[in-house]
Image (spheres, rainbow, N blue to C red):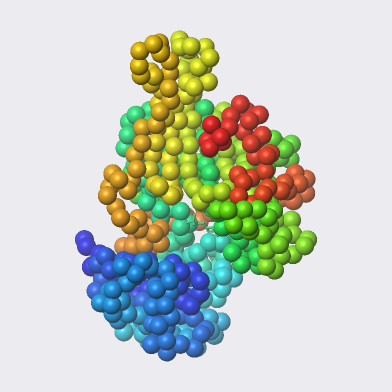
Amino acid sequence: MSSQDHLCDIVIFGAAGDLAQRKLIRALFQLDRAGLLNEHSRIIGVARDEYDQEGFAKRCKSSLERFVDSTYLKSDAWEHFKQRLEYSCINLTQKSEFDHLADCLNQRTDSTRIFYYALPASLYGVTSENLHASGCLNDQARVVLEKPIGHDHESSSQINNQVGEFFKESQIYRIDHYLGKETVQNLIALRFANPLFGSQWKQSHISHVEITVAEKVGIEGRWGYFDKAGQMRDMVQNHLLQLLCLTAMDPPADLSADSIRDEKVKVLRALRPISRDMLYSHVVRGRYTRGLIDGQPVPGYMEEEGANPDSTTESFVALKVEINNWRWAGVPFYLRTGKRMPDKLSQITVHFKRQPHHIFDENQRDLARNKLIIRLQPDEGISLQILNKDQGLGKGMRLRSEPLQLSFSQAFGQTRIPDAYERLLLEITQGNQYLFVRRDEIEHAWKWCDQLLDTWEHDGPRIQPYSAGSWGPKASDLLVFKDGNTWHEDD
Ligand code: BG6
């Protein structure tokens, strides 16, 4: 079946907002350019702003000019895309304002309706209700929910209930955009297509795993949102736990959405809760102070625009996570994520155990470890650190650690790596749910995070400062060091 078969009406709520204009319109434009949208699919923007059709098209064009490389934005590509765009001005709390949208959708019976909520989650319930009441919904309709879905388990469950009144689970696509990244999907291929790794992927061979998601940016004017969330809710509850699940899960029976999601849920259920007495040994929270990023001075978190002097929010978290099952008993997973770090970098490093008996120079005992580095972004690729004999006469049997490298851009000759939203929107148009998060995944992830958030709010270690442009507080190094380890970039 080709993509041309998937005739869709893609309705974007919040079409004038940042997410829609920065990510969704751009992704749809690229899908259109690549011939991956059905010729007759429509994109209907919905917002409260008073645009006419031409005004909305202009808004989208200027966003494309900002966010798309000019080599792709040829006038014929734009004209082709523009003829798909429509606009409807709706106040989402007024049912009567949905009538026009219903008329527009009901013109076609053979088109799949996709409702993308690029909205605050507080509007998900009322939007679903009014879509239903105005006759916009049918059994084939799909709804796309953006994160954050709630602030904790209870609020997330409420939102899921509200949406669940009008959409079945098989119609709901919950976004975690990390799952749309090419390299994140490659984790499944790497682990389950290569017997070499498949056979070693367990506590008998792996000593520990690191997952780092570092960003150079600060909170980018999002104080209002970010200060309520913090790095734990903004990044760990979703992106880092998803990466952990894909790294740690058992092989699924097949590649169907439910087989993969069942395995991820098993990992979430096996996470050891971080109790009060573990806080100091398993958790580091940090907050950036002013410093230098790429040589340029940047303000500290408390100097950002709109800062609240009473804030107790973290911009950095490092955690030692344990998974209570046979595969991973005794293997720490160190998770680390922060804003205003020296690099934008997402990386999983799997450290293998030493050989049971060392026959080489005793001084080189510490060298003797294999390490698999999976680079998710940037410079996507894989590197396997292996030990070799140092070349040359007179060196005896000295060892040297060197990497075997696979760079995806060189190997696959790609000039442009598609943005995660392109992949996710394509899968939604085709009705594939495997890259989307099921309700029980989100709820188990919240439960685990809630107990930690509750504990640290009452008894937590104080927030440690780190200079913008550094790898986080010193305590984050100690977190791994006391187990005899170091973060990969310190090796
Ligand atoms: C978002 C977070 O989900 O992910 C942001 O809300 C963060 O705070 C972003 O900056 C990071 O995504 P990426 O794809 O740039 O690594």
Residue 137: tell me if it is visible: no
Place of residue 28 in the rendered image (x, y in percent of width and height, measured from the top left): 35, 69
Q: Residue at x 53, y 44 (%)?
A: 212
Residue sitting nearer the eye, 482 or 299: 299
Q: Is residue 445 left or right of residue 230?
A: left
Q: In the picture, which quadrant includes the N terminus?
A: bottom left
Q: Residue at x 31, y 68 (%)?
A: 72
Query: How far from the left and from the top, in percent, is residue 157?
Result: 58, 60
In the image, is 200 to the left or to the right of 130?
left
Q: Nearer the viewer, residue 367 or 135?
A: 367
The count of marks equals: 0
Q: Quadrant of residue 8?
A: bottom left
Residue name at image x 67 percent, y 49 percent: 467
| Residue 426 coordinates in the image, percent (x, y) | 33, 62
- Compare residues 48 and 71 and report the one nearer the observer: 71
User: Looking at the picture, does residue 285 appear above or below residue 78?
Assistant: above
Residue drawn at x 32%, y 48% is 409
Residue 364 visible, this orientation? yes
